[in-house]
Image (cartoon, coloured by chain):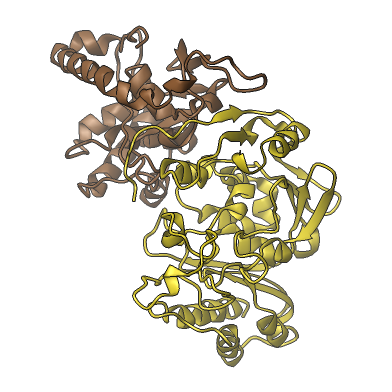
Chain colours: A yellow, B brown
Amino acid sequence: MAIIRDMIPAFELFQPTTVEDALALMAEHGEAGWVLAGGLDSYDWFKDRIKRPEAVIDLGGIDELNGISDGQDGLEIGAMTTLTEIVRHERVRSEYMLLADAAEHVATPQIRNQGTLGGNISQDTRCWYYRSGWACYRAGGNTCYAAAPQAMNREHAITGTSRCVAVNPSDTAPALVALDAKMTVRGRRSSSVYDAEDFFIGPATDITRMTILEAGDLLTQIDIPSEWANAHFYYEKVRDRGSWDFQLVSVAAAFKTSGNTIEDARIAVNGIAPFPVRLDAVERLVIGAAVDEALAVEAGEIAIDGSRPLKHNEYKQPMTSNLVRRAVRSVA
Amino acid sequence: MGEVESAGLLETKYSRRKFIKGVIAAGATASSAGYFIGGSGLLGAQAVPGAAERLITLTINGQQRRVDVLPNETLAMTLRYRLNLTGTKLGCDRAECGACTVLVDGVSQYGCSMLTNQVRGSSITTIEGLENPDTGELSPVQQAVIDEGGFQCAFCAPGFIMSMTAMVNENPNPTRAEAAHALSGNLCRCGDYDKILNCAMRAAELARSV
């Protein structure tokens, strides 16, 4: 891709300074509107002319969406807080290093300086058939090009698929699932709080979106409860090159331990499904168990139960097993 | 085109460069017509209440610059084709190469992937703004690049130099691995990374001694 054609096609730009104004603008413009966070997902769509909004609503001027503060229970992170701010934040680093670690693995320094936590978890999939404007299921069409016999699907899903086999590209998403984060979503008339696990949805729920956010909804805040503060964390992302790349597979895990016994655990994997996958079965296996090599191996095997690779991504099964094995092994 | 900003002593020092720059500027005038003609339907249209303004003031390299920009215009486009600050390069235009790296309030960002209207209240630094405007003295990073001869074709150099500038401001005592991490948002297609890292380490050394 990456052909410099010329300017981004014309749109009207709105820069509201309050959430209320942003929601009103979103309601006014409906499907012709586009919400802009850091913009690093959006500009590619615009430049490639796959998405052509008439009105762009830039959230950059809304102060209440920006910054990290101490909440009643844990941390409250505004959706427009940049990834760099999260990486450098003292309390994130001291108590929730899993999130800082995941945020540090996003793309490049420049992108982390501009990209936001809300944007990182709300970004659309990078399946290139879909991104190139092919009329696939996700784009409203009636086929999946990535699962076709000739398809290049090395980066695609091995589980959680339903017609669409694209994966969630976010590095911070599995960390937020493992930390039991809560997402505050505001509409014009209501406000809801979702568990991170429920915020991300698969194609079986709605094939046209990756998150619970519907048109007119705005993700405003991500809360990190103190539940997992100072737990034992493990984060690892495998990618083709050392920067820029999205994950092939990544694992984010939090363990409460006593000696080498796991008392409680959250393990999430991304890059293998259209949403970050919480490995409930692995959690049930390891909770209450003393960590040894046999447990780590079994955890890795259970992690890929029921997964089904496409033509070119069979490697994701052993890769997922190995990452989960390493996560469990890290406790000992 | 607005008035052409003087690049300070650079232009008087390097007259050949000035000549080349003049030719490029003429070319840019012709080609920028192609860039902006698509948006000409908006020209002269009444501003919509609440919508972003067209005529804005930017703070670039310490100077206030009045400039007429489209809502859909990126900062790299404004710098290169409105303000003639062609030191900022467009490589991929997709936040995938780093050639367009500029500093926004001292923070490195990709000029190709932000709207000019988003940086109205910010202080922008481009490669043209690194030397001392009064004396023409090069910044420690620029001097380090000359000392180490760090680049081959050097198309990526302005972006790398901006990233190095951000790096030495934040961490003037980096290890080589930390420098590589700080520069991991810039690509060099000549594959000159080893020498570029020499530059970064030399730049940090010079910055520490200033």
A218 relative position to B163: left or right: right
Residue A261 is situated, as x and y percent measured from the top left of the image, at 71, 83
Judge from the rendering whether residue B62 lies leftward or rightward of residue B153; answer left or right: right
User: A306 or B192, which lies in front?
Assistant: A306
Which residue is drawn at the image coordinates 66% and 63% (left, top)? A200
Left/right placement of residue A138 relative to residue A212 reads left
Q: Identify the residue at horizontal 58%, vertical 46% (top origin).
A: A83
Q: Position of residue B50 (x, y in %)?
A: 67, 22
Query: As rendered, which of B198 and A214 lies closer to the eye?
Result: A214
Q: Position of residue A207 (x, y in %)?
A: 60, 65
When asked about the image quadrant of residue B186, the answer is: top left
Residue at point 37%, 23% (across, down): B37
Q: Is residue B210 visible?
A: no
In the picture shown, does residue A16 fall above or below A116?
Answer: above
Q: Residue A39 at what x, y percent from top left? A: 53, 41
Residue at the far left: name it: B16
Split into 4 quadrants, where in the image is the C terminus of chain A?
A: bottom right
Q: Nearer the viewer, residue B135 or A271?
A: A271
